[in-house]
Image (tube, coloured by chain):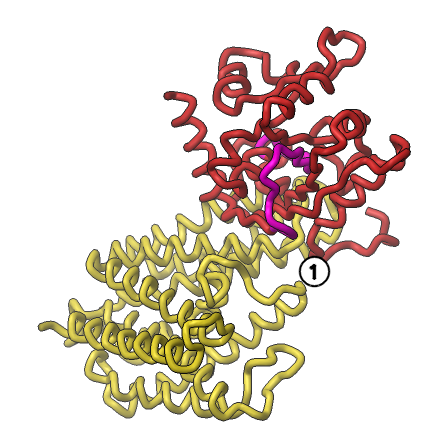
């Protein structure tokens, strides 16, 4: 019961603060799918949740770092019970469970995933960090599953790194058409294509710095 | 029935009339099928019901009600404006101050009716201290542009807009206890001017005023809208401390300010490559799309009343 209240509170707060709006380039699929987004804040997956229907939300689980969410009783409660995170070991040298198998099991059970292929929060001035290879391995292992790019716009300004008090700013989530691994597509090729598909969802900002100014 | 009740009865009657026209258009012209102009009209009128309802609710709670209502509108308008601006991580503190200190402080000063401070708090203290806070973070990339946009946001969304509820703090001899009607006069006249410009423009509009700024603003709409809203303002003299002639002159001034406000705000939207400030109000866009004319006319109206009608 507490987790249901906490979940509702989290969604309401995110909606009030950001007035979030989902912009779908095509209707969301009915079958389990993987939403992959840009990662700039801890609340990223909440924003993707807010643009899903209640039914979809109930069967969509965020993938998150076990090292972060297993630390301390509060984080454990939130990570496991409130958001039902699929907690993966990020450190390849120390892990005992294969994250791709872990995520695959969730898809096989008929649930969707929210994944941040940058692997960590992007705190740089770059729009998007290079993708980790997990996305490719997951897509290769599940060729029928739709991978949907979800660009979360503006949230990094709401809660910059290390700050506690959020600034109310309007956010949008732009969801693109699904992509899948093509026949014979190499890892780097697919990751570059997925990254480009996500960047393509980013809306133009009136005051974007032209590329040659090199920010 | 007191003046306020009469006024709101009148406004609701106008809305009922507008809704019945929109529904008959939907029935006779669109024949129940989707029709972009008529559907947008229905959305707009439905949003008006909600907006008038909220204002009526605020009026029921008097001064506190309107201060809370416009404080919340300032918050929404500020959020829309800042969303479109370019800020960096080093602007965090300045933005936090704007949202969590300057905005509540401005409305608190109005609530305690400290005119001497609320009339300079943002234009002087906000103006000087925001760049100081930002400069301390030593991030000089596009510094002036960043800070100027935050200052603009604060001036328009908070300082100018707060002059609407500030009207209730004016004491006009022989008008005591009815100051809230000044808000009704300002809002009804300026918003009607927007609506009438839209209607005149749709009916007769041919020659565009500023095609590169706003495709929907025409000379026919402007002249027809401003003149008819000025006539409406004159007709509302009985809710104000003004004579009919004064009411007409004041309505004309605030209608012109409102029109130019819309023009300036369109220029900013154009510059940012967006059509609307937000999506909160179906058919209208954002809060700023609805309030741009009020923001530009409120301080002028406030000063006219304060210097012309209070001792």
Position above or below: B262 against A79 = below
Residue found at the far left of this picture: B1
x, y (%) of residue B255?
42, 82
The one nearer the camera, B289 or B178, is B289
Badge 1 density bin: few <14, some 14–19, many ≥20, Cα 10 Å: some
Q: Quarter-wise, where is residue A51 in the image?
A: top right
Position above or below: A79 against A170 = above
Q: Residue at x 36, y 53 (%)?
A: B107
x, y (%) of residue B261?
51, 74
The one nearer the camera, A194 or A126, is A194
Q: Residue at x 79, y 35 (%)?
A: A129
Under tag 1, what secondary structure? loop
Q: Residue at x 31, y 80 (%)?
A: B308
Q: Colour of chain A?
A: red
- Asked if the magenta segment contains residue A40, the reply would be yes
What residue is shown with label 1? A206
Chain of the residue where label 1 is placed in the rendered structure: A
Position above or below: B295 against A200 = below
x, y (%) of residue B76?
46, 54
Range of residues picked out in magenta: A24-43
x, y (%) of residue A31?
61, 35
The one nearer the camera, B223 or A136, is A136
Position above or below: B216 against A192 = below
Q: Quarter-wise, where is residue B242 in the image?
A: bottom left
Can you tell which chain is drawn yellow? B
**Residue B272 as seen in the image, left or right of residue B311:** right
Main SS, magenta region, reads: loop
């Amino acid at each position: 019961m507490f987790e249901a209240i906490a979940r509702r509170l989290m969604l309401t707060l995110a909606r009030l603060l950001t007035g979030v709006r989902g912009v779908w380039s095509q209707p969301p699929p009915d079958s389990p799918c993987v939403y992959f987004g840009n990662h700039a804040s801890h609340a990223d997956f909440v924003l993707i949740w807010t643009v899903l229907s209640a039914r979809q939300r109930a069967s969509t689980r965020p993938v998150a770092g076990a090292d972060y969410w297993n630390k301390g009783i509060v984080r454990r409660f939130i990570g496991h019970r409130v958001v039902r995170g699929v907690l993966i070991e990020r450190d390849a040298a120390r892990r005992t469970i294969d994250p791709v198998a872990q995520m695959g099991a969730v898809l096989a059970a008929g649930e969707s995933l929210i994944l941040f292929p940058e692997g960590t929060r992007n705190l740089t001035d770059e729009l998007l960090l290079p993708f980790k290879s997990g996305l490719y391995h997951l897509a290769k292992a599940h060729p029928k599953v739709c991978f949907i790019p979800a660009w979360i716009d503006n949230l990094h300004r709401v809660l910059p790194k290390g700050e506690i008090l959020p600034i109310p700013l309007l956010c949008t989530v732009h969801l693109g058409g699904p992509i899948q691994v093509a026949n014979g597509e190499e890892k780097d090729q697919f990751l570059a294509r997925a990254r480009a598909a996500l960047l393509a969802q980013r809306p133009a900002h009136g005051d974007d710095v032209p590329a040659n100014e090199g920010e | 029935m007191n003046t306020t009740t009469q006024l709101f009865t009148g406004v609701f009657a106008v809305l009922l009339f507008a809704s019945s026209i929109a529904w008959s258009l939907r029935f006779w012209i669109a024949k129940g099928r989707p029709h972009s102009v008529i559907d947008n009209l229905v959305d707009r009128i439905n949003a008006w019901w909600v907006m008038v309802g909220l204002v009526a609710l605020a009026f029921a709670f008097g001064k506190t009600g309107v201060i809370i209502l416009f404080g919340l509108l300032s918050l929404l308008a500020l959020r829309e404006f800042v969303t479109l601006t370019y800020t960096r991580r080093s602007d965090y503190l300045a933005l936090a101050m704007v949202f969590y200190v300057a905005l509540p402080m401005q409305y608190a000063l109005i609530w305690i009716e400290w005119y001497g401070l609320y009339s300079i708090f943002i234009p002087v203290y906000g103006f000087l201290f925001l760049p100081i806070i930002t400069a301390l973070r030593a991030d000089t990339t596009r510094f002036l542009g960043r800070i100027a946009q935050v200052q603009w946001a604060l001036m328009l969304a908070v300082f100018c807009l707060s002059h609407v509820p500030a009207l209730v703090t004016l004491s006009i001899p022989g008008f005591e206890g009815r100051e809230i009607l000044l808000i009704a006069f300002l809002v009804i006249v300026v918003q009607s001017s927007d609506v009438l410009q839209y209607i005149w423009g749709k009916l007769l509009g041919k020659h565009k005023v500023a095609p590169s700024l706003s495709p929907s603003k025409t000379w026919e709409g402007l002249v027809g809208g401003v003149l008819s809203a000025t006539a409406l303002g004159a007709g509302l003299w009985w809710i104000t401390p003004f004579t009919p002639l004064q009411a007409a002159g004041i309505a004309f001034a605030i209608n012109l300010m409102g029109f130019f406000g819309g023009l300036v705000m369109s220029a900013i939207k154009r510059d940012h490559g967006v059509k609307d400030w937000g999506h909160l109000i179906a058919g209208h866009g954002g809060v700023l799309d609805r309030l741009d004319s009020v923001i530009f006319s409120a301080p002028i109206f406030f000063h006219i009343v304060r210097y012309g009608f209070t001792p």
